[in-house]
Amino acid sequence: MTEEQRAILEKFGFSLEDGKVKHSKLGIVREIEDFMSFSTARELQEFVKEILRNQCQLKRKKP
């Protein structure tokens, strides 16, 4: 993972732990490989935003 990719993840509250990408506040845990296939920083940012939106929508639907 490049420094630019790492910086983008950290900007959105993610951290790298044990080969996984984690967001401790939202409980998101994904494989690091899921984030490494993007060719541009913009694509990675959009993917991260989508993950965060989906997680927030799931939390809102739970009673």
Image (spheres, rainbow, N blue to C red):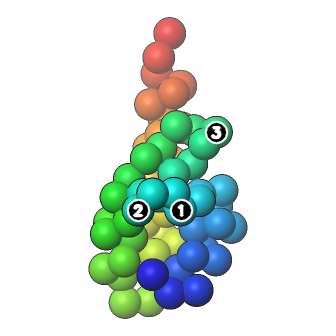
Residue for badge 3 = 25
- In the image, taking residue 53 as reference, residue 20 lies left or right, namely left
Q: Position of residue 28 (x, y in %)?
A: 47, 44
Residue 58 image position (x, y, % from top left): 44, 31
Labels 1 and 3: the sequence-earlier one: 1
Q: Earlier in the sequence, mark 3 or mark 2?
A: 2
Residue 32 placement: quadrant = bottom left
* Residue 42 in view (yes/no): no
Residue 16's disc is 1
Residues at marks 1 and 3 touching, judged by CB atoms closer than 8 Å: no
Mark 2 lies on residue: 19
> Of the residues shown, which amino acid type is indicated by label 2?
Gly
- Locate residue 37 relative to residue 51 in the image: left or right: left
Are discs 1 and 2 less than 8 Å apart at CB? yes
Looking at the image, residue 55 lies above or below residue 10? above
Residue at x-position 66% and y-position 56%: 13
Q: Is residue 3 above or below residue 46?
A: below
Q: Is residue 32 left or right of residue 25?
A: left
Instruction: Give the secondary structure at mark 1.
Output: strand
**Which secondary structure, mark 2?**
loop
In depth, the one of 12 and 17 nearer the eye is: 17
Tell me what residue is drawn at x 32 percent, y 66 percent.
34
**In the image, what residue occupies the spot 51% across and 27% down?**
59
* Three-letter residue code for mark 3: Lys
Tell me how far mark 3 sits from mark 2, CA to CA: 18 Å
Q: Residues within 10 Å of mark 3 (few under 14, many from 20)?
A: few
Gap in angstroms between the C-alphas marked 1 and 2: 7 Å
